[in-house]
Image (tube, rainbow, N blue to C red):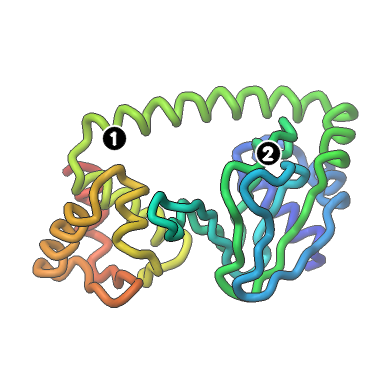
Amino acid sequence: MSKQAEFAVILKMNAMFADLGADELQRLSSLCHTQHLGNGEVLFQKGDAGDALFGVRRGQVRIETGASDGSRLTLNFMGPGDLFGEVAVLDGQNRTADATAGEASELFVLRREDFLAFLEREPKVAIRIIALLCQRIRWQSERMEESMLQPLPVRLARRLCALAADFGSEVHISQEQLGVFVGAARESVNRQLQAWRKEAILDLQRGRILLRNMTKLTAIARNE
């Protein structure tokens, strides 16, 4: 499979492009090029212009921000098949976080000027993006409600299940980073993880979590 065909598959898996036909995806993917990053190399920093959409072909990219104590917090992990930078490629505003390669990576890159020119030729895609942005507003509202109403075990289990879907049963993340994800103090996250460790749902190692019983964790995430 060519690189352009691979990018078309990644686009098809993303909500923004899921309704596009094969010909439209082919035309869009033909605009991309690839970029290689070494382990630890910075792709962009907070404040940089949002001039491109990225798709991960191989490797891992961490979306990070700085904490008040000077440490780094990982907000999200992007693995093979993931797209990121959708909003920035639309509005051209500055990046709101840093993106750093967690390992040697290869990315698909779609430049903003190429994408906007494509939208002018393909109004159907522009309509789809309007619908996607509305979905994101709804998603943000649901997450806000979840953070206020759902108990910590449910929020934590949902986040771990989401990470497992992307990276498998060995999740490389700190407890502090998990706390940022779920809106809880590190101490509260640690107590819950220790309880699950005793129940053999997971195991804890330095900087990573090994998920042992996904069936049970999924049930907790569903609040069952």
Q: What is the distance, in whole Å, between disc 2 and disc 1 at their CAs?
A: 27 Å
Residue 172 image position (x, y, % from top left): 40, 69
**Residue ID for mark 2:** 94
Amino acid type, residue under disc 1 in the picture: Ser
Q: Is residue 200 above or below residue 152?
A: below
Locate residue 211: give its quadrant: bottom left
Mark 2 residue element: loop
The residue nearer to you, when weighing 199 against 185, is 185
**Residue ID for mark 1:** 147
Quadrant of the snapshot with the N terminus:
bottom right
Amino acid type, residue under disc 2 in the picture: Asn
Quadrant of the snapshot with the C terminus:
top left
Report the side of 125 relative to 41 (left or right).
right
Q: Which mark is residue 220?
A: none
Residue 138 image position (x, y, % from top left): 46, 25
Mark nearer the viewer, 2 or 1 = 2
Disc with the residue nearer the chain's start (2 vs 1) = 2
Report the side of 178 relative to 123 (left or right).
left
The residue nearer to you, when weighing 207 against 210, is 207
